[in-house]
Image (tube, rainbow, N blue to C red):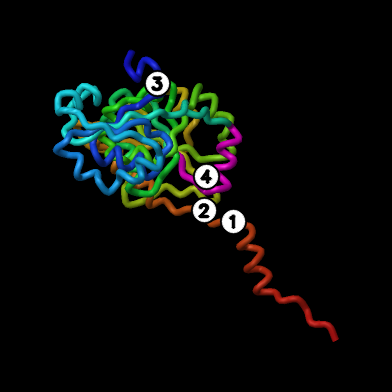
Amino acid sequence: MSTAEAHPHSLILRGKPAVLACLKYHPKALREVVTTAAYAPTLAEYQAELQELRVKLRIVGPIELSQIAQGRCDDVCALTQRPELGLARVGDFTDWRDARETIVIADQFERPEDLATLARSMASFGLERLLLSSGSEKLAYHPEAWALAQGALEKIKLMRAAALGGLLKLVEDRCCVVAFSSEHGRKIDLTTPVRVPARHLALLIPNGVLDPDLQARTEHCFRFPGQPPLSLQETIPIAIAWLSNTPKPRPDGFLARKKARHAKGNPPPSHP
């Protein structure tokens, strides 16, 4: 019985960047590290840490390494055990609003390459919270996505969003949903970030045409210009970079600043 069959939430990491990122951010997920005799010396500096975690470092031949990694692997792979993705709830959006976290929502993603691109783009710009719709959550345990992400997925907090349309309807007073679509919405001006004063922001990135039910839940919908249209992998980095330039709401709020200005301009009267 394979590891994947024995544990439905197991995940095989391929490549040194992915393995070292797991060791850094989620060391308790590691179960076993496998490499070849030729590559083992490059992992010498991590052996003490692995021993402290009681993670075995196993030496095998190149062919066996690829078999264990379930794909081409020339350096190192790791067997990991991951928890089931948490389900996003209405209360979470309140917490994220209070923490001023920007949320990214991936809808109907099908290719591991697209999830990897999204994770690397988010990690590059410091975004951490990613919700996967019911059509995308299967990629959360796809070895190819984690290998192509080169460790970026370890920095991302993954959750799943069942019944996404209904969820967004329930949280419309907590966040402003901005979506991209290949066919709908106004043409985006990358020099002008969307402004959502005192609002929490969620970016919805669909795979292809935006679902009509989700379109009704968005406050802003943009499309990228150009023919032929850009692929999802081409669109994602541009969208994340554009989103990162959006002004963040100030913690004191508009009304608080207005009252402060009024108090400053009208000092209390002095008493004789």
Q: Quadrant of residue 128?
A: top left
Can residue 232 be seen here? The reply is: no
| Sequence-wise first label, 3 or 2 | 3
Mark 3 crowd level (few <14, some 14–19, many ≥20, 10 Å Cα):
some
Quarter of the image containing the C terminus? bottom right
Q: Which residue is mark 1?
A: 253
Looking at the image, residue 197 lies above or below residue 23: below
Callout 2 amino acid = Pro
| Sequence-wise first label, 1 or 3 | 3
Tell me which residue sits at (64%, 67%) in the image. Answer: 260
Residue lying farthest to the bottom in this orientation = 272
| Sequence-wise first label, 4 or 2 | 4
Callout 4 amino acid = His
Q: Nearer the viewer, mark 1 or mark 3?
A: 3
Query: Disc 4 vs disc 3: Cβ atoms closer than 8 Å?
Result: no
Q: CA distance from mark 1 to mark 2?
A: 7 Å
Q: Which residue is mark 2?
A: 249
Q: Is residue 152 magenta?
A: no
Query: Disc 4 vs disc 2: Cβ atoms closer than 8 Å?
Result: yes
Q: CA distance from mark 3 to mark 2?
A: 31 Å
Nearer to us in this view, 132 or 207: 132
Mark 3 element type: loop
Q: Which residue is mark 3?
A: 135
Callout 1 amino acid = Gly
Instruction: Give the magenta-colored segment's residue range.
Output: 90-103
Residue lying farthest to the right in this orientation = 272
Q: Which residue is mark 4?
A: 200
Mark 2 element type: loop
